[in-house]
Amino acid sequence: MREMDFSLTMYAEICKALQLHKVVTVQRYLSNVLESPCLVLRHDVDRDSKNALAMAKLEYEYGIQSTYYFRYPNTFNREIMEQIANLGHEIGYHYEVLDKAGGDCHKAIALFQKELEIFRASFPVKTVCMHGNPLTKWDGRDIWSLFDFHDFGILGEAFLSCSDIPIYLTDTGRNWNGNNNFKDKLPAENRNKNFRNTVDVIRFLNSNKDNIIYLNCHPERWGPGPWGWTKAFMRDHLFNFCKKALKLFRSGSMERF
């Protein structure tokens, strides 16, 4: 393969590897009607809904259905979301209410209900996923220590309800090894693969069709065309620099106590 890593053409190579697997949405995995093994495919639409549409169309060409989690209001684009839903993909809510509420769980749950209703005015949202902002000190999943997402008609939370999956692969930080990854983690995350690039991930997918795998790819990272790739490359490296600086600052702050 000579495609540039983290390009949409490289993601097409991932789609080819996924042909060996039973690819399912988060909702379908949690519905308890499947026989394993399967591969759960999820996308956190953090910054670029247009890239999400391009990725969704590509998956459709390969007969793949996946889950797309949109933030509100950052990437909430009803027209694009409808197009993605019409391709057979699941639309979910990428909540970040604890950050918005400054860590107040009671304010956060009220905001969660309000934003969920906005989503459900157009889409039958059954699963949700925490957005992990590395710049804040809160973990959005903590609200579920006080509240129950089932009370809102939610089938599952993409982290908490999938923690039994033994292999979790995510492109967070523009790599597959967990570097610069603050919050996009599962308790059972498999960190021992030592992937150098996406080609290694594809080889892994090709040789592990009998395992249950959870794959998360962020659409803004897989920009279509040269400019899309360049923009994502520059943004990712800037964010990674900021994450490293923040990590050093936090560790220095802790050493002073």
Image (cartoon, rainbow, N blue to C red):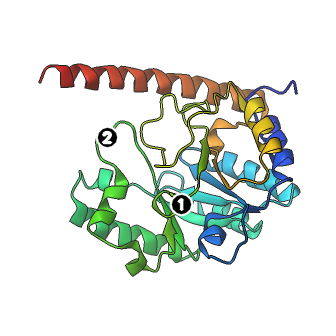
Residue 10 in which image quadrant: top right
Nearer the observer, 63 or 215:
215
* Residue shown at 88% from the left, 27% from the top: 1
Residue 124 in which image quadrant: bottom right
Nearer the observer, 140 or 34:
34
Residue 141 in which image quadrant: bottom left
Q: How many angstroms separate mark 1 from mark 2 (CA)?
A: 24 Å
* Residue shown at 29% from the left, 64% from the top: 145
46 vs 222: above or below = below
Label 1 or label 2, whichever lies nearer to me, is 1
Task: Provide the secondary structure element on which disc 2 rests.
Answer: loop
Q: Which circle's residue, 1 or 2, is located before the other in the chain?
A: 2
Task: Provide the secondary structure element on which disc 1 rests.
Answer: helix
Q: Position of residue 91 (x, y in %)?
A: 61, 65
Nearer the observer, 101 or 186:
186
- 10 Å crowding of disc 2: few (<14), some (14-19), many (20+): few
Q: Position of residue 30 (x, y in %)?
A: 59, 71
Amino acid bearing label 2:
Thr
Read off the residue under disc 1. Answer: 162
* Residue shown at 82% from the left, 36% from the top: 9
Q: Is residue 2 left or right of residue 214?
A: right
Read off the residue under disc 2. Answer: 136
